[in-house]
Image: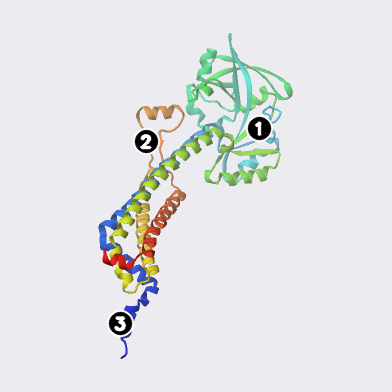
Amino acid sequence: MPTNPRNQSQLHFPGLSTRGFYLRMAWRNIWRNKRRSLITIASILFAIFFSIVMRGFQLGSYKNMVDNVVQAYTGYIQVFDRNYQEDKIIENTILMGDGVISKIENSVNVTLALPRLESFALASSGNQTKGVLLVGTDAEKDDRLTHLSGKLVQGTYLQNSDSAALVSERLASYLKVGVGDTIVLISQGFHGAGAAAKYSVKGILRFPSPDLDNKMIYLPLEQAQQFLSAESRATSISLNLKNSKDLKKTVKILQEQLGDQYDVRSWDKILTELVQQIQSDNAGGLIMLAMLYLIIGFGVFGTVQMMTAERRREFGVVVAVGMQKGRLGLILATEMIIMGLIAIAGGILLSLPVVYLGHVYPIRLTGEMAQTIIQYGMEPIMPMAWESRFFINQTLVSLLIIIAAVIFPILSVTHLRVTKVLRS
């Protein structure tokens, strides 16, 4: 007697070879026990949400710190003579007469090129004498890069045509000088030439760092060049960028344009202590993330183990009527992957508005913490980074947890003893 084709297909499960059948079976199995499935989804979802938010605050604080530090003095990139870092003497300085400034400013991604001439000098007033760091600078450009005029507590800011100096507050207090007083500077100029001159104090600057506040004197660049007999020379050229994300690319382009006689360095090659501090803090943040994911991973594994134990009899019945263990394991894996993808999508969608608002409208600190941060010349805010990479990283870690969790039910089904399960 001929067999009904429809009944035959149902008995022999040919539909199991189709992708749609696996998805339908997995989807129905997920919502058979809504509470269990929602617990699994929620645990992964909130792990992703908290990790993205935490990572956003951490990376945002690093970027804010870097921006504040590099814009306080160094700039994102500095250009030196190729020998200057090995031997920081005035003879190893950049000769600006060959149009190096215009070459740099015309380069892609560079918004400002600030030449500085730095040297050690002795500053004297009356009976007081102290070693200082003398900085000759383009006053207008320096203010655009570092907001130097914002550190002014007395007097007025420099003009490039002035024959006057700005003195840091603690140094001025030590030398017992104020606005309108005169200081004497003594140093050694280019090729050993003697350097001595008098300058009136035009303004007093306050630096957050006590070290800088004890030793800084600023002169207009031309005055410093004349004082040190180093006309058209600079020890460094500090650069500001349109987009700091293209830092490495910009360094490479500038090095190719300027040639081997110049040394082009990014801020992280100059401020190595800051880089080490960030790396150390970042390692702590990654350990916290690892602990969070470890806790969530055990939670997910426990839920999967419970789900597998509850459904052992169901698995035994399905295998007994003809379902292959491999195909049953594939359906279980599909269930976990679907729940994982729902959780990942939910976690990202939930965190996106939080991270975006934290990036555009950073949390503004108040009280003593804010005052401490302001004293170090930084804005008292907690911004969040808006970068795709940490969204992607958290997604990949979550997928690894899900894949690891899938292994247990597959192994459980593979080693399933049907007769024992059905009798229990």
| C-alpha span from label 3 to label 1 | 84 Å
Give the x, y percent position of residue 325.
Answer: 38, 68
Q: Which of the marked residues, 3 or 2, is nearer the chain's N terminus? A: 3
Figure label count:
3
Q: Is mark 3 on a helix, strand or loop?
A: helix
| C-alpha span from label 1 to label 2 | 39 Å
Q: Residue at x 30, y 65 (%)?
A: 420
Q: Residue at x 33, y 56 (%)?
A: 305
* Mark sitting on residue 7: 3
| Closer to the camera in the image, 76 or 368 | 368
- How many residues crowd mark 2 within 10 Å: few (<14), some (14–19), many (20+)? few
Q: Mark 1 points at which residue?
A: 85
In the image, taking residue 34 as reference, residue 68 lies left or right, namely right
Give the x, y percent position of residue 236.
Answer: 63, 33
Query: Disc 3 marks which amino acid?
Result: Asn
Q: Which of the marked residues, 3 or 1, is nearer the chain's N terminus? A: 3
The quadrant the N terminus occupies is bottom left
Q: Name the residue under label 2.
A: 364
Q: Which residue lies furthest to the right in this view?
A: 191
